[in-house]
Amino acid sequence: MTALSDHRTAARPTMADVAAEAHVSVKTVSRVVNHEPGVRPDTAERVRAVIERLGFRRHDGARLMRQGRTFTIALVVEDLANPFYSQVGAAVEREARIRQHQLITASAEGSPSRERAVIEALVNRRVDGIVVVPADESASSDAVLEASHTPIVYMDRPVRGTPRDTILSDNHGGIRSAVEHLVAHGHRNIAFYGDDPAFWTARQRRDAFVATQQSLGLPTTPRVSMGPHSPASVHESLSQWTTGPEPITAVITGNNRITLAALLALRELRLPLSLVGYDDFELAALIDPPVTVVHQDPAAMGQKAAQQLFARLLGDESQAQTVVMPTRLIVRASGVRRGTPNR
Amino acid sequence: MTALSDHRTAARPTMADVAAEAHVSVKTVSRVVNHEPGVRPDTAERVRAVIERLGFRRHDGARLMRQGRTFTIALVVEDLANPFYSQVGAAVEREARIRQHQLITASAEGSPSRERAVIEALVNRRVDGIVVVPADESASSDAVLEASHTPIVYMDRPVRGTPRDTILSDNHGGIRSAVEHLVAHGHRNIAFYGDDPAFWTARQRRDAFVATQQSLGLPTTPRVSMGPHSPASVHESLSQWTTGPEPITAVITGNNRITLAALLALRELRLPLSLVGYDDFELAALIDPPVTVVHQDPAAMGQKAAQQLFARLLGDESQAQTVVMPTRLIVRASGVRRGTPNR
DNA sequence: TGCGGGCATGACAGCGTTGTCTGACCACCG
DNA sequence: CGGTGGTCAGACAACGCTGTCATGCCCGCA
């Protein structure tokens, strides 16, 4: 254990060291370091010289503990490597940085218990606030947060119980725009592939699909398949739905990964179906055919969440609000009719 | 400023509160909280009950300050939203989490001065160690780190000066495998599009390209174009190099973004050139034609960097080492000859 | 010469923990 | 019955900094 601390025990001068060397009190050093007034220029200069010479750096841990806040916020997501979350992360970090805060990021890997553990650790560190993409709607960690009075903003999915600031994407509107787009291009038989219905967003999008179909008077033959999906699972139902009566001519996919699976399946089956995917992705324009997508803006969502959090940190005591961020349909060739509709 | 602290001043019980309530000393509470021996079961039980009742949570900031380390590491990259870095980030966070550490992520946005500021802030917080993708080779922040004795691991790019642990990707091998692959498919006139030569990796890859061309006895007509690149800039030189004498039949791109630019340019020009890109990307298999790539493994690099950092934290005092991670050529259709070579 | 007032500086406590050391109490033994 | 040793518990200082308050000094003015 001695080795462990070598790099710390080694001559890290404190204010006391500087004070002794400069023949002033610790408080004066503090004043100089923090640019507080009331220090004679020559004294300040002397102190600065010693600081320079000893290589002193203020210990922010001590400082922050004295001051009661940590100038740190945290972001808890499912998987940092997922482009959606990494864009959220970049946006949140940016908001934090311009406000002199630091960002701790943590992955809960989709596990509520891990999420709880992670959040407890963050609360114990007294992070000033947390942005969470909750792993489940019951949010077992919510009680912890309640007790700790740590401000929190939920993202992408709501949580039952105490009302909290929540930033959502307009799942309903997004799906509706997708369906309407396809209908405008003459499609009437459309399939929907959604993610695991354990996810709130997956259910939202499915329900929006069904509702839109009904409101537009489309055939309501159940062509909804919920995940988790693989290229193989998509493949299977696709080959059914394209061969029976009223074969589908278009597909809507409920997220990134499913879009990928569907594209692979479509390619294998050599089916020229139209496709609209939920979530934009890099290079969507380069796929053949270019994929039309419902774009939600993760950067904007992250930014909004961080801004809301900082508003709370600055004392905004208004009622918790839910913000629904608009989506945008990016039309590329894939939504346009290619197969021959059979009626 | 009062509002600012509402959520903190509000009843956050300390060990002293618990101690008073349980009629024991603070130290005993500490013992119970930390599962230290030497507390009678009934006393411990009483203390636990009070802890539960008051909702006490240990203040890790205070604890860590007493103990001298923070159980925090940091990752400094250029842009968290870039898939390469986000995968690195996910891997580093994972390594940190399984070791009970937390990860602070920060973007330097490619600016050396911002990087310096960010690193100074991290050092001031006494993070236990830092993984950095340095913005430039001179690494002005290195002096700060030297003085603070904070362990550091550099990633993706080396830094001049004091030797440090460095995790690099095998740029030379990667490019060589790309060139050899193309040559094996009959290509002899190959162009290289690299990123801004201000980047060390960009220069490495360019140099590797030139060297490999020479060693394989290929025509050494200079068909190297360094960035920054846009689809337009690629477009321009492409149309030149495909029309003059000894027209090129294949292209190698030096990173993700350039691959994208090149794909767009090739599509516009309707040129059936072969393409090998540096960096794999999601959906590369779905592009038409599927893009052959040199795959570097960001997750493995991040993991390796974190592991090396933790080894240092645990007292590994051996000499700084540079690890070069292998790359892997993922052959998809795009490397295969499609255009008609003109000889 | 004495005094009020401002300025520069310092002493001290405290943020919430933990490490060290001391002490009370009890049991056991010769 | 006194000494010894073990167990449980607490007092106190310290981590490095900042907020509060006190002090000393010099200046100007009556």
Image (spheres, coloured by chain):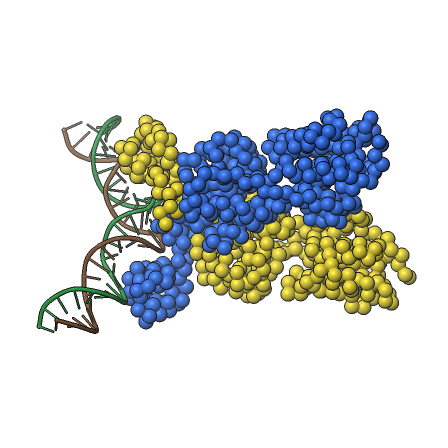
Chain colours: A blue, B yellow, C green, D brown
Give the x, y percent position of residue A93. 53, 50
Along the viewing direction, whichever of A199 and B132 lies nearer the viewer: A199
- Dividing the picture into quadrants, the one containing residue A169 is top right
Along the viewing direction, whichever of B223 and A298 lies nearer the viewer: A298
Residue at the location (74% across, 63% down)?
B233
Residue at the location (76% across, 38% down)?
A184
Give the x, y percent position of residue A60. 40, 54
- Dividing the picture into quadrants, the one containing residue A171 is top right
Image-based side of A288 in relation to B35, left or right: right
Along the viewing direction, whichever of C8 and A61 lies nearer the viewer: C8
Residue at the location (74% across, 44% down)?
A291
Give the x, y percent position of residue A332. 75, 46
State the count of labels.
Answer: 0
Q: Is residue A252 visible?
A: yes
Along the viewing direction, whichever of B320 and A97 lies nearer the viewer: A97
Give the x, y percent position of residue B308. 55, 51
> Looking at the rendering, in which quadrant would you find the C terminus of chain B?
bottom right
Image-based side of A225 in relation to B182, left or right: left
Q: Is residue B88 visible?
A: no
Residue at the location (44% across, 37% down)?
A145
In this rendering, the answer to whether A7 lies above or below A159 is below
